[in-house]
Image (spheres, rainbow, N blue to C red):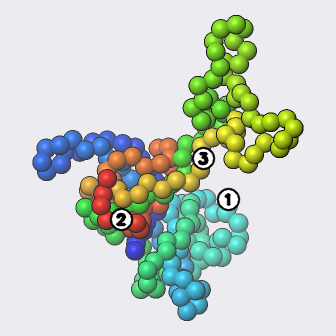
Amino acid sequence: MKGILGRKLGMTQRYAKDGTLVPVTVVEAGPCKVLALRTREKDGYSALQIGFGQRKAKNVPRAVKGHVKAAGLAETPPERIREIRLAEDPTCAVGDTIKADVFAAEDIVDVVAHTKGKGFQGAVRRWGFSGGRASHGRGGLRRTGSVGMKAQPGRIYKGRKMPGHMGNAQRTAQNLKVVEVRADEDVMMIRGSVPGPNGGIVVVRSARKSKTAR
C-alpha cells in the first residue's frame, strides 16, 4: 500500500499504444513531506502522515506549526495534511519527501476527493424526480409530492428522499489505471474522471478491492 496527496488540474486525452484515444485526468501529485509515522506497536495501526502544498505561516495555528516543526515546515506549513494507511509499518523517516514516482504507469489506484458542492437543491434536481403535471396551474411542477401518512405513523420515515444539501461529499473512484507519470513535473495522468472540481485536493492510493482497471 502506498499513496500521495495531489491537486486535480483537469482532464485531457492521450493515445494508447494500440492507437485508441484515452481520456485522462491530470493530477499534480506531490511533492509531499512526511510529517509523522504510525506503527502497530505504538499506535495500533500502520500509516504515514503527509502534507501537501503550502500556506502562509500567519494563517496556521501554533499547534499545527509545532506538529510540522519536526519535518522542517514550521515556516512553510502544508496546505493539507492526510494519513495514508499502510499494510506494514513505514520504513521512511519524518522529513522525507514523497514524489509522483511512488507510482508508475499501469498501476491500479483509488482516488479519494470531495465532489463539487451544489448547495441546497430540490428533489427534482437532487434525486431526479419527474415532478408533477405541467397543466392546470402548474402548482406542483417541481414539488416533492406526498412524503408520508397523516394518522399512521404520523411522521416521515428516515431516509426519505427530500430537498437538501447536494454535493460536497467524500467519494472514491476505484480501480483506475495510471496512464503516465512525469516525476520531473510532479504530474500523474490517471485514466477516467475523478471526483471534485479542478483545483481540488485528491488522495491517490493503491487500489484496495481489485486489481482490474476500469
Asked if 52 appears above or below 200 in the picture, the reply is: below
- The x and y percentages for residue 76 are 56, 66
Look at mark 1 in the image and give the residue it sits on. Answer: 59
Mark 1: amino acid: Asn
Mark 3: amino acid: Asn
Res 96 visible = yes
C-alpha distance separating marks 1 and 2:
41 Å
How many numbered tags mark residues here?
Answer: 3
Q: Residue at x 31, y 53 (%)?
A: 214
- SS category of the residue bearing label 3: loop
Asked if 79 appears above or below 147 in the picture, the reply is: below
**Circle 1: is it few (<14), some (14-19), or many (20+) Cα within 10 Å?**
few
Look at mark 3 in the image and give the residue it sits on. Answer: 168
Please identify the residue farthest to the left as the structure is shown. 18
Which labelled disc corresponds to residue 210? 2
- SS category of the residue bearing label 1: helix
